[in-house]
Amino acid sequence: MNLTADIVIMGSGAAGYSAADAALQKGKTVVIFEKRPFQGGVANCAIQYIVVRNEKAYQDKAFHLLYEYGNYNGNPKVIRRYVDNSWRTREFIERLGVKMEVADAVPLEDLGAPERADGFPPAINVHGDDTHALGRGRGHGGALVGLYAMRDIIKRGGTYLLDTPLTDIKLDENGAVCEAIGVHNKTKEEVHVSCKAVIICAGGVQDDPEMIREHTGFTYTGKDAPNGGNVTFNCFPNTKQTGDGHKLAWKLGGAVGNISIEGHDMIPGPGIETSTAWITYNQFKIMTEQPYLWVNKRGERFFDESLSNNHISTCRGIRNQPDRVSYMIFDDDTRKHLEEKVDYFYFVFPAEKLTDVRGQFKDLIENWGNKHVFMADTLEEICAQAGISEEGLKKTIDRYNGFAASGVDEEFDKPAQYLRPVKKGPFYCMRIYCGGYNTIGGIRINGDMQVIKENFDPIPGLFAAGDNVLNELYGNPIIAGLGAAYFAMPLGFAAGDCASEYIDRL
Ligand SMILES: Cc1cc2nc3c(=O)[nH]c(=O)nc-3n(C[C@H](O)[C@H](O)[C@H](O)COP(=O)(O)OP(=O)(O)OC[C@H]3O[C@@H](n4cnc5c(N)ncnc54)[C@H](O)[C@@H]3O)c2cc1C
């Protein structure tokens, strides 16, 4: 099949449909290639869209907070693109006819305030309005947006090629994009689209363990982390996020940017999350929020555990430990405490107390065969099962119990109320890894959303947006921040604008 379009978009996720919307608004023709048989990408989920208000004071403050968050390593022009286009997310969704409710309107002075962090560093909470797309039934707002976006884009003349991965991009004799090629998964028919620009919006690399190893240093062996893996993801199953966009950008001479693990610490499965992310079999995800004793394999503490519900700081701490692994340990008194009141509730699972913690451990160990949680009468047994140094742990616990008795953490200044002693068996232990929804980053772009080479020259006609460029927002860390539709969409709108303006200048 041969087609012609101004702009080809690789991927129909949050960035892809936003880029298409912006390009159509500027009078351009678009073709979207989507490798999966369905539209919408990873954003086919319950989605909270937090939006920077379309007011200069909010946008400026959000800009400064994000730039500072990345230790000034992010690309300020890309950050500005995000901040200034964020409001379009809500406008677009409402234009599609999906209702939005504002769950929380945030005053300017509270932008980035610690108490708004919800598990992420305050600086990522730069948004004026915390909004939710109201889906049908419970929690399918994101999927509804993806579906309605496809219908709307087709109605406005756009073309969706589902089940058709984009496999190649051709440059003309001047090095400018001139053609995109895809192959239908089932019929194997080739589709050639003659075009002036391609926008890469192909998401992360979580289904390519080799890319993860090479670019992040982590080992991904699956959601249950068997065979020595040390990172785990809770992306939706069968998303097949294999970094196709990265590979094409790099093949065409695009510079290699950092690929980051987002930063949700997790106990690997089985028996914790169902096949759908964020729906769980038990309360282990709430347990990992708690600010008690966390140690590394040497039995040593490694951070102020009162930060344990700030997933990025926790993951950064874990990433810096031997084998990039951590353990949380508590005793039977703390088990009882948890059944009366959890210290940190989890915004996704708002339980205030836990039920039958011992039974939950037993079920996970005996019925699910989970190899990452441990329960034993003695610390010696816990150490033997979990692979923690017994000598190191005993030394740490002696000191830590002293801090608990005096109410003063002489090591990391953790507040006294979280200094719970570890004394009385049975003891409970969970192995916790770094993780995320997916990976983010890897493609370098400039402030005009153009893919750039090592020498910073843009590849004419090649643009990128969404999760695959978030390194530019966060400043290329190994453990990053949050990949979100509400980051991907504004960058998608910006890429649609920039690609259209590039074509107008030809
Ligand atoms: C469990 C979970 C909960 C989340 N909750 C939220 C939330 O509450 N709020 C929020 O804002 N974000 C949330 N996110 C994150 C959000 O979904 C992603 O950040 C967002 O979808 C990224 O958009 P994207 O367009 O960059 O990539 P994706 O949405 O991943 O889209 C990429 C698309 O490219 C396609 N593709 C890949 N290769 C090719 C190829 N060769 N050819 C053609 N197409 C290709 C993929 O199939 C996919 O459709 C959540 C994610 C998960 C997993």
Image (tube, rainbow, N blue to C red):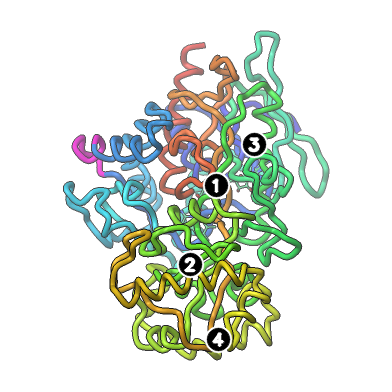
Query: Quarter-wise, where is residue 9 in the image?
Result: top right
- Mark 2 or 1: the one toward you: 2
* Label 3: which secondary element: helix
Q: In this view, does 60 lie above or below 44?
A: above
**Label disc, if present, on residue 13 of the rendered structure:** 1
Q: Which label sits on residue 360?
A: 4
Asked whether disc 2 touches disc 1, contact meaning CB atoms under 8 Å apart, the reply is: no
Disc 3 residue type (three-letter): Gly
Q: If you read the primary sequence from the N terminus, does the residue marked by circle 1 or circle 4 appear first?
A: 1
| Label 3 CA crowd tier, 10 Å (few <14, some 14–19, many 20+) | many
* Mark sitting earlier along the chain (4/2): 2
Q: What element carries label 2?
A: strand
Q: Which amino acid does label 1 sit on?
A: Gly
Q: Of helix, strand and loop, which one carries label 4?
A: helix
Give the residue pinned by disc 2. 294
Give the prevailing secondary structure in the magenta stretch: helix
x and y percent of residue 205 in the render?
64, 46
Does mark 2 have its CB less than 8 Å from ligand 1? no
Which is closer to the viewer, label 4 or label 2?
2
**Mark toward the viewer: 3 or 2:** 2
Is ligand 1 closer than 8 angstroms to the Cβ of mark 3?
A: yes
Residue 338, label in figure: none
Tell me the CA gap for discs 3 and 2: 38 Å
**Which quadrant of the structure image shows residue 385?**
bottom right
Q: Give the range drawn in magenta.
A: 53-60
Residue 112 higher or lower than 328, as above or below: above
Picture quarter with the N terminus:
top right
| Viewer-side residue, 151 vs 276 | 276
